Image: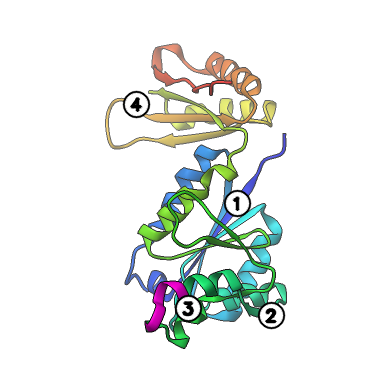
Amino acid sequence: MATTTAAILVIGDEILSGKVGDQNAELLIGELRELGVALRRILIVPDEVETVAAATRELSVQFDYLFTSGGVGPTHDDVTIPGIAAAFGLPLVRHPELERNIRDYFGERLEESHLRMAEMPEGTRLIDGPGLKWPVPVCRNVYILPGVPEHFRRKFLAIRERFRVEPFFLHVIYTQEDEFDLAAGLTAVADAHSAVAIGSYPNFASDEYRVKLTLESKNLSALESAVTDLMARLAPEHFVRAELPVVPAS
């Protein structure tokens, strides 16, 4: 079963300097997981056309989807669009639909700087969604989203269902066993069940459990087999509780 993958490219000096905190990647982490898309990379880069171009070129080839965040305004430091165009060797052209929308929106207040927002890499398509005043530009497999968290959230949520694929199934086990004592058994289970991702996370914040174990897969039967194998290796007297995977309705 092929896994659909994604990367996030966050563009902005303000993120790297700590002047502004990043909320958009945090949103996408949860959203993509719920949609069944495996997020493989998050990269933050400065407002430099060449750097944006290099990152876009690399990530767009490696993953099914690339989501960019930030750098799409009318000011001098908004370099995402030129960077994406450079990544694919495409000229910047004025998108007729965007230009029309901008002219209608600003009316007599229109300035040349406003029309910069209509410049897109040649071949860019626009995706509309419920409640969107401005569509989402897409260049090849790159979805171009704004940096302002409220706008980013609104735009992504309007188009999110187009990315939904087979879900991830997650089984969580809590135990009082020490992580050192679990290591050999976890390795054996991981080696025997390659379709299942297994994680081990020690807890030092409470006395309820010592280790949280996660087993995750898009293949429910493979997951159940791995869980059975792991449970047989755990000391039953140290078992605390488990959270079973939710099976989506067919």
Of the numbered discs in the image, which one, if any, rests on residue 78? 3
Is label 4 or label 3 in front?
3
x and y, in percent, of residue 73 in the image:
45, 75
Residue at x-position 54% and y-position 21%: 249
Three-letter code, disc 3: Asp
Q: Marks 2 and 1: CB-CB under 8 Å?
A: no
Q: Which residue is mark 4?
A: 209
Direction from residue 129 to residue 195 in the image, left or right = right
Along the polypeptide, which appears first: circle 3 or circle 1?
Answer: 1
Disc 1 secondary structure class:
strand
**Magenta highlight range:** 103-108
Of the numbered discs in the image, which one, if any, rests on residue 6? 1
Disc 3 secondary structure class:
loop
- Packing grade of label 3 (10 A; few <14, some 14-19, many >=20) is some
Q: Marks 4 and 2: CB-CB under 8 Å?
A: no
How far apart are the two marked residues, 3 and 1, measured between alpha carbons?
A: 23 Å
Residue 71, placed above or below residue 36: below
